[in-house]
Image (cartoon, coloured by chain):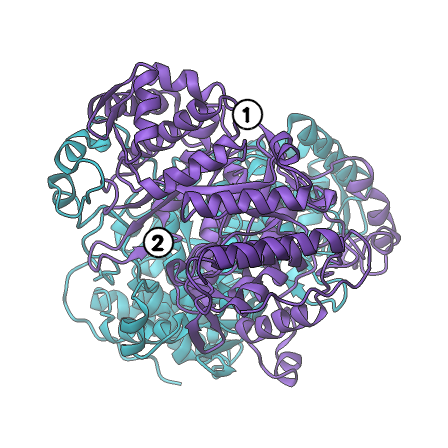
Chain colours: A cyan, B purple
Amino acid sequence: MRLEAVVSRGQGPRARRFPAAPTQPDPGGPVFRNTMPRYEVLSEDAMATLDQGWRRLMTEIGVEFMDDRALELFRKAGQRVEGNTVFLDPDFVLEQVAKAPREFDVQARNPANNIHIGGDSMAFGAVYGPPFVRQGDVRRDATMEDFRSFTKLAQSFAVLDSAGGVICEPNDTPLDSRHLDMTYALQTLTDKVYMGNVVSGVNAADTIAMSSILFGSREAIEETPATISLINCNSPLRWDDRMLEAQFEYSGAGQPVVLTPFILMGAMSPVTIPAALVQQIVEALSGIALSQLIRPGTPVIFGSFLSNIDMQSGSPTFGTPESGLGLLCTGQIARHFGLPFRTGGGLTSSQVADAQAGYEALMTLMPTFLAGANWVMHSAGWLEGGLVAGYEKFIVDVELLQMLRHEFTPLEIDEASMAFDAHQEVGHGGHFLGAMHTMERFRTCFYRPLLSSSENYERWMRNGGNDANDRATVAYQKTLEEYEQPDLDDAVREELEEYVIRRRAELGD
Amino acid sequence: MRLEAVVSRGQGPRARRFPAAPTQPDPGGPVFRNTMPRYEVLSEDAMATLDQGWRRLMTEIGVEFMDDRALELFRKAGQRVEGNTVFLDPDFVLEQVAKAPREFDVQARNPANNIHIGGDSMAFGAVYGPPFVRQGDVRRDATMEDFRSFTKLAQSFAVLDSAGGVICEPNDTPLDSRHLDMTYALQTLTDKVYMGNVVSGVNAADTIAMSSILFGSREAIEETPATISLINCNSPLRWDDRMLEAQFEYSGAGQPVVLTPFILMGAMSPVTIPAALVQQIVEALSGIALSQLIRPGTPVIFGSFLSNIDMQSGSPTFGTPESGLGLLCTGQIARHFGLPFRTGGGLTSSQVADAQAGYEALMTLMPTFLAGANWVMHSAGWLEGGLVAGYEKFIVDVELLQMLRHEFTPLEIDEASMAFDAHQEVGHGGHFLGAMHTMERFRTCFYRPLLSSSENYERWMRNGGNDANDRATVAYQKTLEEYEQPDLDDAVREELEEYVIRRRAELGD
């Protein structure tokens, strides 16, 4: 396979963004700051009960680490190790957790796209991992061309801070070297933060090497990290060897890792939400403790991927009431431990971008904002329980993210906002369409949708009677047509290309 | 037109409910009690600023009442009246508001369906007012048969406490007497609370008379009200004559009225949310004050119907960020005045039950639950900005209501819920499908959807590849097929029929 031809259009370091709502203010700047209240549902008593629960589980059942280096680190730190199981002292774990930064920055090659993780910042990445894609009625294997298209979409919408990592699996590229192609695409087609590959320690090392090229040196990315990587737990209570290999590479290089219990309640955890929460704490904190043993102070994110299965069919389900409630609790728990956290996204079980996809995505995204999640994966394009990256669904999710950014921007309540003069002008039973107060504000006063239609019936029919899915097709195609690649220094691009070509050969592809 | 033949199937006073999730617990009983925290977004300072705003607007601009009896009542109570405008003293208004009950009951003919309005109770009624209906691809004028079908759907789902009132406009019945047909249908096809007709004082009097028949006497409904009626303001700041006529009838009979500012920001109010909130307070409180002058202590509900227009087209828009934020504030404001409140619903501008309809409905319903609205109109079936009652959308909304009831049910966090024994049984990397803890709970542990599908791709395709809209068609048709009419005493039914026949003749139809 050839490397994609890189077209440098010389438009300066700042990429053109799709003007979804050209005249409205973009609240919060490049990274959204959610300064609305948090919605907290756990009482102090409930939190104390959960605290007892995770301490007991960690102490008595322990956590398996399928990596000798990890076991050795825990043993040397005085923890009891039997076989692959580490019986962790909760207070020791909390000491390690306290070494992790509460907040940190991640740099993008365009400094305007740097992100902050933690506090009231919320950063959003696209869907991660699907082997398939859907375009309208067509569902098929994902390809490298799809990977590039989704990456371009993520670059085009200001509301997304990252294309994520494996935005879809490029099944037409060799398994051993596709991480090189994906990383190269993320580095060149976007100028936003990207995620690191975690399939193996080798892949992680390649990602770090390519990031060192892009940002000038390994020192440059150790000083301010340039990748975020997802380390999933093999829940319940086991960290697998390949994920741990990647964690050693990334934590060793000071790159943030998202330690994520992967829990579908009923399968990977008990069916009760409190049990899932307790297990999630044990898993996340044990992984975080390991990161701090590898490199004290290395940035970490408390991860959560929490939903449930359908107990009749065993199918995973998303956007459920249980997952929404679990998400709200997760935010509160992460704050309890003083850690930035990852959860949420536009999750759905639906096969297509229909009503179910719309409400399930929002059923996850609304609690995501209520909880103030700091790092939100799967924010755009998730379909069919994560098996499919949906082009139309991508547009639906961008609309939801834009709406929620507006909804979670505090009101300014002052004298002018109460518009007494407009009432004097309009009087009883009149209308405000032509009032001075309106004329001064009409361009920016309300959110302007990207996808939603408020056309009346006659106009809607004249325009083809297209539902949201039809309109989303038009929107993603238009966005791809208008995409312009962000500029990149030729020397850097060539060095990245050389690295990819050399490593591909070494890996035998 | 003949009265519908009433089929008494003799199955006792309790109507059969559609078992959407037969084996799961129905949290909260017949009327949902939302004991989760309220999500409040207004600071004390913000509330104080709004307090200054509404006091000034009420004092200096005043409110128009297009009814001489209303003007006379205000004049006699010492308020300044000029023409139709009443310049209200805010403290006088608050004295009147204090006479209204904070909470009250409304009786249904099946006592199991009585509802409580206020406190943490949330009661839900179906869509109200659409002249059109949509079934799949067909959009057409609503008929009396549609009215009956939607009433049957409302009766069939336990999550709905009321079919509402004008669930759709039966355009094939005479205008002057259709309120009789609608009230009769609501009284006989459901045994839940219903809403009163408000087109005129005459219609209101007929509703009260028919309710007196159904509940035995006028005294019986004055003791515990049997209807709820919607009195809309002609915003900005005008109460129209016909609505006021109906209000005099209902408040005079001690029947609760929902005093509702009808605000699409940009048209009926200034474009800023604080201005809309201030105007909403003035309008609602002025109407509530009138009710208390008509009959001190008569039950009222602080109403809100608050969204915005699209400033490019002038079209009303629903499920917007601005409406969601306004809704959250409205709940806080109503509690500030110690009043039960109405807001929310499954609002959308969409023409069909697509992704937009799904997310816009939830964009309104989620804040409805976060705010803890006490009386929620338009909870099921709203489509196309309220012009259309959608059969498929009805099912989408019932699903959302059921999900939200589950999500807003507090977690029980205790020793058993943390499932330590299940972890002992399963160990590291195992699964919980067969664990004892799971076996004891699998039937009821998770919400079971009415509409959402989590089928895998192959199975979904084998079953026809139906999207949520297609599946909703099947669901509403099945529900109508399985509908069974609640029993009603023959003598009462005959008396109601006689009343309708006599009044229809008197009205000239």
Name the one closer to the observer, B462 or B137.
Answer: B137
What crowding class fits label 1: few (fewer than 14 Cα within 10 Å), some (14-19), or many (20 or more)? many
Q: Name the residue located 25 percent from the left edge and 55 percent from the top edge.
A: B310
For disc 2, the chain is A
Q: How many labels does the image show?
A: 2
Q: Position of residue A104 (x, y in %)?
A: 41, 40
Q: Is mark 1 on a helix, strand or loop?
A: loop
**Pointer 2 local density, CA inside 10 Å: few below 14, some 14–19, many at least 20:** many
Q: Which residue occupies 47% across, 58% down? A: B177
Q: In the image, is residue B87 above or below residue A179? A: above
Amino acid beneath label 2: Gln
Instruction: Quickly name the residue at label 2.
Output: A402
Percent of width and height locating residue B186: 60, 55
Give the camera-side residue of A270 and B72. B72
Asked if one can make out residue A327 in the rendered structure from this viewpoint, the answer is no
Who is closer to the viewer here, B243 or B127?
A: B243
Quarter occupied by residue B286? top left
- As shown in the figure, which amino acid type bears the numbered disc 1? Arg
Task: Give the number of the mark in front: 2 or 1.
Answer: 1
Residue for badge 1: B102
Parent chain of label 1: B
SS state under label 2: helix
Q: Do the residues labelled 2 and 1 touch (CB within 8 Å)?
A: no
Judge left or right: residue A141 versus residue A56.
Answer: left
Taking B292 as reference, is A33 above or below it?
A: below
* Residue B362, position as x, y percentages in the image: 49, 53
Q: Residue A399 carries which label?
A: none
